[in-house]
Image (spheres, grey):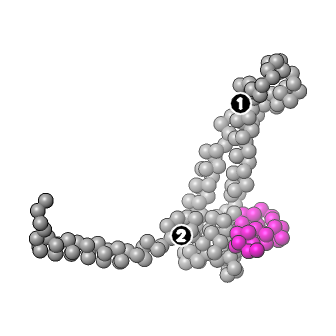
Amino acid sequence: MGARTNSEYRTMKKLLFGILIIILSCQPAFAAKTGLSELDGSDWQAWDEEKKVHFLSGFLLGSYHVIKQNEPAISKDDGSHRYDDMRKRLSSGQDRKRQRVKTATFSREEMILWGHYRASMIQKGLADYAVYDIKIGLLSKGVDELYRDSKNMKIRISDAVYAVKKQIKGASREDMERTLQDLRGDP
């Protein structure tokens, strides 16, 4: 490679200066909130009613999709009660193969039962977060009300939705206060 000319250095300097200007002018964009997990009460209050409804619609559809995708692939009771029968048989020690084996091995049926149990526990845990049978307008008004208290402004919108759901579903005043304290990070 040969020596660089003054013209090449000036071109490189201009290019670097241009890149620096672009980076500095984009800095406010880099500081903006980039994810759902960062949105809080200040964002919510800046939105008009239409944006709030669109946000909640997408949020609820997304959470519903996640819950449905994580339902157990095998129904709890497909009419034959085979899981109940299997559970009774395994717990009563009637499985002859199991009695002969002294090491901790599991039969195919036990593994199916275990898999079903784990899937149903995941589903049960996700169901706690499901927001069913609540109109979006009511949910939006509840979130508005939650953010009227300035102490709640730093609560993420995703957490606020579930707190409002708890309240609408009949949580006690004490339970709601504990939930809000946890979400705010109060001691």
In the image, residue 16 lies at what x, y percent?
25, 73
Camera-nearest residue between 182 and 59? 182
Q: Mark 2–mark 1 contact, CB under 8 Å?
A: no
Q: Report whether residue 141 is seen.
A: no
Overall secondary structure of the magenta section: helix
Task: Tell me the residue at 84%/20% (across/down).
Answer: 99
Residue at mark 1: 112
Residue 135: image quadrant is bottom right
Instruction: Tell me if residue 175 can be seen.
Output: yes
For the residues marked 2 and 1, what is the alpha-carbon distance in whole angstroms?
45 Å
Residue drawn at the location 64% of the way across and 44% of the way down: 70
In this picture, is 123 found above or below 2?
above
Q: Which residue is at a point 29% across and 72% down the rendered structure image?
A: 19
Specify the quadrant that holds the N terminus. bottom left
Q: Could you say whether the residue bearing mark 1 is in a helix, strand or loop?
A: helix
Task: Indicate yes or no whether the magenta region holds residue 16.
Answer: no
Residue 165 is covered by the magenta coloring: yes
Q: SS at mark 2?
A: helix
